[in-house]
Every structure is written in structure tokens, then in C-alpha cells.
Image: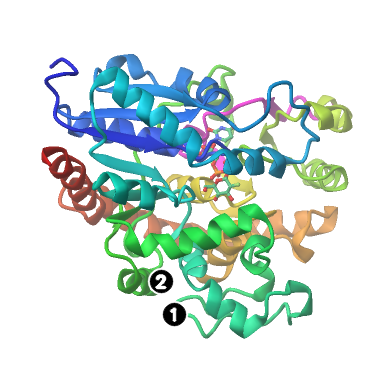
Amino acid sequence: MSTEQKKGHVVAFAFPFGSHPTPLLHLVQRLAAAAPGVNFSYFNTAESNQKVLPTADLKSYDNIKAYDVEDGAPKGYVFSGNPLERIELFVKSTPDNFRRRLEEVVGETGLKASCLLTDAFLWFSVDMAAELGIPWVAFWTAGPAPISLHMYTDVIHSRLGQNGAAQNQDQTLDFLPGLSAIHASDLPHELLHLDQPFSRLLYDMSLALPRATAVVLNSFAGIDPDVETDLKSKLKKILNVGPSPPPPGIDQDGCLSWLSSHAAASIAYISFGTMLTPPPPELLALAEALEEKQIPYLWSFRDDSKRQLLQRFFEKTESVGKVVEWAPQTRILAHPSVGVFVTHCGWNSVVESIMGGVPMICRPFFGDQMINRRRVQDVWWIGVGVEGGVFTKSGMMTALDVVMSGGEGKKMRENIGRLRECASRAVAENGSSTENFESLVDIVTSSSHQ
Ligand code: U2F
């Protein structure tokens, strides 16, 4: 079917940082396969597109086109190194950068937008969609608990105060449905302090989400039932469509054959996602604990500024360790040799660990990661945090003992098994995530007939 013959034009706007753009692109690909009669456009910054598009195989879709939008950085701008700087420049350039590009694309193709499917952070889409008279579908890339906490920002401020430093950090949020295990200390900085542009963006998002036609999550029914029920009362439609089918993940460094030469559940897989590396003293403590316990490890490590620090450790442990710049994570976590995942608790990593049946040692850093750690450790019982919240040699050794050799580790694996069954039911034929995905296809295609 040629572009002109296709009905409808779904326009996806990515938030171009961390692992946000990739899951949105995967969702667009799933939708494009399910609705071949609809055109899809994927808008992202050039820098982020250069990272995500090469792995996406868009050539096999004749109904997806990717476009670059401006990132807000003036020509020749020299970044200070603060990661928030890029985000703030980008946020300042919205919504005009997306609006301009959309007008150009509509002009070039003659295809008016029939639905906006955007990262939930890009809340301005609600007004843009209203102006165009089309639905706004918001994609939330994290779990149900963090979105619920954002929806309760005002209540949290009235109970705890806006100044995080003045609070009792151990106070639990037992005044919020399904969130009583969360401590004040788990709350992200940007939820408590609304004075920064990024915090403001998240607050504005929480006000906009109830107006969305649907909010889509890479999550599944039953993982946080009380939170889900409460969210249903606040949003028009909430569609858990996960866990998303894992991307193939190319194994260019031979991780899988390396894993296969090891005993079942013997390896520690270490990765801190796409945005961070722990600070130097913690990296050293983690390395010392692995060495002392003689745990074979597979480490996804690509921070050249900190590589020198670990060089001696990597050399000394060469016979038991493997270090790669990028690992096919979903396939690694599904491998029987992996016994523990040392993680920052990014939402995708947590879901992938559940699907792989691997218990976690959690060292969260920012955003939703402390909330995810709390759920892993105290609600689902499928992992542990590290003593004192930061890596120390002794704390890490204790955590490794708990997860890899004790009866507790066995119990965690059983608990993960139950969650995994729940996820598998959700994505089976007639499962809730399968049905939700069909509803999403309906929203996208019915708006195409307007
Ligand atoms: C931000 O999270 P991150 O991007 O840092 O981390 P994850 O949500 O865990 O996603 C990382 C993804 O990258 C993949 C891995 C995940 O799908 O499988 N990956 C890989 O394939 N190979 C590697 O060597 C390393 C990673 C943010 F920081 C979090 O707080 C949020 O929860 C998250 C979602 O909004 O975005």
C-alpha cells in the first residue's frame, strides 16, 4: 500500500534521553505491524535518532518514517557536563521544535496528524492534540507506582512539605493507596522540589495526564494491583501493554557462549542502564566484593572516564570476568547461568530481570529508581538493596551471600516465578496486555477515520 493510500497518520514524539526513545520506537513498530494501513512518524532529536535508529530495522516497515527535531542547543554550544543541561535546553525548545517539524512533515506528505502518541513527559501534546482535534495517547516508560506518586504531588507536598531536607526521611506514604511501603527518602528530588524546569515539567505532566485519551505503560496487570485500581480512577484509560516483546539484541562480544561455559545461577550480571556509572569509591567497593567472593561476572561498562580505575581489577580477574560496552541484556537475563543482576533499578531492567527470573541487588541513584528498589525489596521480595544505600565492600558481600547462596535467594526466585507467570498470562492470547494492545490499535486506527 503506498503512503497516499494509507489512512491516518500517527505521530510519535520521543523524549530524547536515557532509555525513553527506544521503548517508544518499539511501540510504534508493534503498532505499525498491527495497523499496516496507517502511517507512523517518529520524531526525535538527530543525536538520539543516530543512536536508536541503526538498531531498529525500520527498512522492513513501509509505514514508519523517522524525523529529526531540534535539540535546543545553540550552534557550537559547549556543554558543562551536567546531564540536566541537555534536558533543560531541550525542554525549553519544546513545543515549538515539535510543532514546526510537524507542520513541515504535514506540508511535505500531505498527511494531517490523526493521533499524537508521545512520551508522557511531553505533556504539551495534550494541548497540541486538542488544537488539532485528535487524541493524545501518552506513553509512560516507567512503572505504575511512580506515575501514581506524580499524580499525588500536591497531596505529598501538603503532608511532607516541599522541602525534602526538613522531612522525617523514614516516614512512609501510608496515606496513599498501594504506596505504604514507599519512604519519604525514596521520593525523587524533582517530585519534592518544583523550582527546576524539569520538576515543573513533571508536575505539569501530572496535571495533563487525566486529559489523555489513554496512558500506555510497559507493565502488566497484577504487578501492583492497588496502585493500578487507584490509577484507573484518575485517568480516562490506562493500558498496560507489557512486558513488550524483547528486541533481538545482537551478541557481538560472545556473551551468551561465555555464559554457557558457566554453572547455573553462578554469574553476577552488572549494568547500570543507559545514563549512569556509580562514583569511583563505589565501583572499587563493588569490584573488591566480587573479587573476595570469587564471583564470576559479566559487566556492561562503557564509561571511559572511569575505566582506568577498574583496569587492575579487570586484568586480575580476566579469567572469571567479562567486560563489554553493550550487552544483549534481555538475552543475558534469560540465560540460566545468571544468578544475580546488580542494577540501578531502571524500570526496563527490573521488568527484564523479572522476565529472566533473576533476583536483583539494587543500587538506585535517581528518579523512579529508589521507588523501584522499594518494590523489588519490600513489596515483591525479589531482590535486596545494599546496606546504607551505597556500595561498600562488606555490604555488597552480604548482598551477594543473601541472593546467591542463602535460602532467601531461593525464595526470591520463587517470588519472581509468580510475577513472571502473571506477566506471561498478560501477554498470552486473550491476556490483559494483549487485549490492551488491541484497544490501543483501535484508538490509533479509529482516530484515523476522522
Ligand atoms: C531511565 O533508565 P535507563 O535507561 O538507565 O535504564 P532501564 O530502564 O533499565 O533501561 C535500560 C535498557 O537498556 C538495555 C536494557 C534496558 O532495556 O536491556 N541495555 C542493554 O540492552 N544492554 C546494556 O548493556 C545496557 C542496557 C531512567 F534512568 C530510569 O530511572 C527509568 O526507570 C527508565 C525508564 O523510564 O529510564
- Residue 86 drawn above or below residue 339: above
Magenta span: 316-338
Disc 2 crowd rating (10 Å Cα; few below 14, some 14-19, many 20+) is: many
Horizontal and vertical percent position of residue 318: 77, 25
The residue under label 2 is: 227
Q: Nearer the viewer, residue 107 or 256?
A: 107
User: At 54% across and 84% down in the image, what residue appears?
Assistant: 174
In-image side of 13 versus 87 (left or right): left
Task: Please report contact status of discs 2 and 1: CB closer than 8 Å, yes or no.
Answer: yes
Q: Is residue 329 magenta?
A: yes
Horizontal and vertical percent position of residue 427: 26, 48
- Residue 440 drawn above or below residue 334: below
Q: Is residue 122 magenta?
A: no
In-image side of 25 versus 257 (left or right): left
Quarter containing ligand 1?
A: top right
Asked whether the viewer can see residue 9, the reply is yes
Query: Which numbered circle lies on residue 25?
Result: none
Total marks placed? 2
Position of the N terminus by quadrant: top left
User: At 82% across and 45% down in the image, what residue appears?
Assistant: 279
Amino acid type, callout 2: Val
Q: Quadrant of residue 246?
A: top left
User: At 34% across and 21% down in the image, what residue appears?
Assistant: 65
Which type of secondary structure does the marked residue at label 1 adopt? loop
Horizontal and vertical percent position of residue 101: 42, 28
Q: Quadrant of residue 184?
A: bottom right
Query: Which numbered circle lies on residue 177?
Result: 1
User: At 63% across and 75% down in the image, what residue appears?
Assistant: 183
Cα separation, mark 2 vs mark 1, equals 6 Å
Disc 1 crowd rating (10 Å Cα; few below 14, some 14-19, many 20+) is: some
